[in-house]
Amino acid sequence: MKKVGILGGGQLGRMLLQAAANYPVQTFLMENDNTAPASHLCHHFTKGDITNFEDVYQFGKNLDSITIEIEHVNIGALEKLELEGVKIIPTCAALKIIKNKITQKKYYESHQIPTSPFIITSGIDDIYTNLSFLPAVHKVGEGGYDGKGVQIIADESDIQNGFNSPAILEKMVDIKQEIALIIAVGNNGQTAIYPPVEMVFDSSLHLLSYQISPATLPKSVFWKVEAIASQAVKKLNSPGIFAVEMFIDKDDNVMVNEMAPRVHNSGHHSIEANYCSQFDMVWRIILDFPLGNTQSIMNSALLNLIGEKEYYGKPKYTGLSDVLAIDNVFVHLYGKDQTKPGRKMGHVTILSHDKQDLKFKVNQIKQLLFVQSH
Amino acid sequence: MKKVGILGGGQLGRMLLQAAANYPVQTFLMENDNTAPASHLCHHFTKGDITNFEDVYQFGKNLDSITIEIEHVNIGALEKLELEGVKIIPTCAALKIIKNKITQKKYYESHQIPTSPFIITSGIDDIYTNLSFLPAVHKVGEGGYDGKGVQIIADESDIQNGFNSPAILEKMVDIKQEIALIIAVGNNGQTAIYPPVEMVFDSSLHLLSYQISPATLPKSVFWKVEAIASQAVKKLNSPGIFAVEMFIDKDDNVMVNEMAPRVHNSGHHSIEANYCSQFDMVWRIILDFPLGNTQSIMNSALLNLIGEKEYYGKPKYTGLSDVLAIDNVFVHLYGKDQTKPGRKMGHVTILSHDKQDLKFKVNQIKQLLFVQSH
């Protein structure tokens, strides 16, 4: 039975391990916190720092394969393991490109993959010398996550909010729609594309408000979305699951915003709404089985369950009973020990044949379900 | 967060724990074998004998609730725990009725629930004194499982195969269809009924060959099936998930064959084929949330993956890749360390709108997928 390691024990690891239990695989997990969401669901838990060379190397050296649930891992150790014959999914080369927003942008540029215009900055001084480029979005090269490490620089007065570390300054796009799409790549390069989803963001937290699958798109735009996302993923030459977030502007130009080389929030609906979930797909790839069917079973909406403002500590889920009384609503709590404002504590998927019904239920659930603390 | 214990660490416990990860619950599991299918998926594993009074009592005394994945547990300990305020789901009273086929038959009789005629026997001598009752089926009172503890006594020459322990001798029914149906009962007595499934048995092993959901039944029979199963479950006055296996004879008489007070093989398809799976439903009941939607999403077939004859030892799954290449096929392997002839090693669910397509794929999979050993 293959020995497969996961670096990171958050909700993505948790859902990966829920799916792993259907497959012939022995699971290993490394995470600093043995109460993390995924820690108890593996066969073998190792307490360790996924950003530390020695920890990652020692964890990996007796494994057949390693995958990640977060990009912020020690790639040096993974490269050594890869050389020694441990299969790293995605490959270290792909991880390195995507992990840093600067190398990611350069990758799009070198492969003629449409993306918004950008300038590489080493500090806020570089923004002052490019005032004509504003309005723009400043994104740190490494370490940004869930809306952190991103600042809107509308005009000169916002520049002080920028980052004094390597970053990219992206030209603001006049966005009509935000789309995300999950692509699976097998070991022989075969791909399977999930239907695109439409993401609706909460502008204040820069967090996903809700998402609808499949997105409503004119055929011509749909083909562009699929072609560009496929190109963005295929040029990485790496097996794995990839999420591609894209902008569609007022003129129906499609451009890649960013990618993730792993299961992604924008694919969580696939657990119930698609034949083969993104988590199931990862095991098919790692264990070298054929890719699954990515088709939608039904329309779905997905909303994240976020720690309420001002609440810190042991989470209390109010309204859970009311939400579970609504038909075809699937609540996934991540089992996090502590809530804090803006923290992702779970998600809710809604299935319905009718998209209006989905939006109605999204709003209903937003008024019912809150994560506070005891 | 509620502390919930599961007695038994087989595949049912495994699938219960896969579903538990969506809910706010701390899971405890007791099983004699720490490599059992469910052992690694709980928060807290206790190595112990679920049939031993002291083991079960010590395991349960600090828990809020306990459920079971097998009836063969120490009910004395559970009764003491129940008196001390631990919620046992199903109740000990219900467990006691169902655990023993003799008390189960008497229960049907006393509540006028249709069931095949029977005689209680204490040994094979009692069969010899009831020759006119043959052909019949001899079933041991306690300890029968997966086709064991059941013998067909067609005529006098078979009597030697009967059991010399308390048992029931059931009149052979001229069966047209075998049906099973899962019913969920909430803490306030509310019920939710899953669509009935049609079971097709392998006569040699007396094991399920495959099952189709929902069963194709004339309306009049469907109502009878639902009414009789509901009655059989409701009179137990216990929360929990119950499986009711029923015979339909040539004259469309419906009778209860037997019940299980827990998640059941006949409900495994519900993971993919119904909005709320039987495993999800258990957590809703234990955590006192509303019952979920039992409706079918799509037609489904389910087949068990059984250890091949003559193979013993570390399992080897041949044909897994070929089966996973078929669209909308869901393989659940139970992670058992050892295979042996007739052992349930996993199951396969197939989704399709078309029942003919389901039967075609069942046959295809039966010719592809085998559990042998290394």
Image (cartoon, coloured by chain):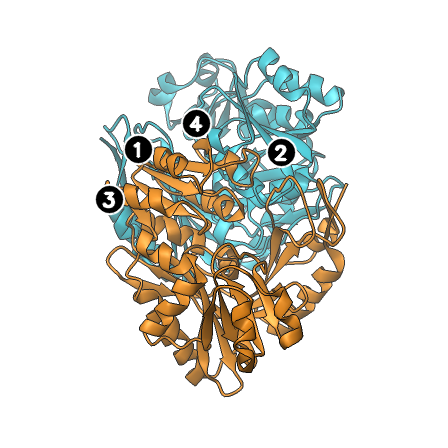
Chain colours: A cyan, B orange
Q: Which residue is denoted by mark 2 in the rendering?
A: A26
Q: Which is more foreground, mark 4 or mark 3?
A: 3
Q: Helix or strand or loop: what does disc 1 sit on?
A: loop
Between residue A357 and residue A280, name the one nearer to us.
A280
Q: Are marks 4 and 1 in contact (CB under 8 Å)?
A: no
From the image, tell me which residue sits under label 1: B62
Using a 10 Å C-alpha cutoff, classify the residue at mark 4 as few (fewer than 14 neighbours), some (14 to 19) or many (20 or more). Answer: some
Residue A352 position in % (x across, y down): 42, 61
Q: Tell me: B262 left or right of B177.
A: left
Residue B8 coordinates in the image, percent (x, y): 47, 43
Q: B65 or B309, which is in the foreground?
A: B309
Q: Is residue B128 left or right of residue A63?
A: left
Q: Are marks 4 and 3 on the same chain?
A: no
CA gap between label 2 and label 1 equals 31 Å
Disc 2 residue type (three-letter): Gln
Chain of the residue displaying label 3: B
SS at badge 2: strand
Closest to the observer: B114 or A323? B114
Determine the chain carrying the residue at label 1.
B
Instruction: Tell me the crowding category of disc 3: few under 14, some 14 to 19, or many 20 or more residues within 10 angstroms, Cα based.
Output: few
N-terminal of the two: label 3 or label 1? 1
In the image, which is nearer the foreground, mark 3 or mark 1?
3
**Residue indicated by mark 4:** A36
Q: Is residue B299 above or below residue A317?
A: below
Which three-letter amino acid code belongs to the residue tagged 4?
Ala
Q: Quadrant of the N terminus of chain A?
A: top right
Q: CA distance from mark 4 to mark 1?
A: 23 Å
Label 2 vs label 3, nearer the camera: 3
Q: Is residue B8 above or below residue A156?
A: below
Q: Which quadrant holds the C terminus of chain A?
A: top left
> At x 27% / y 26%, what residue is drawn?
A313
Which residue does the numbered mark 3 point to in the structure image?
B83
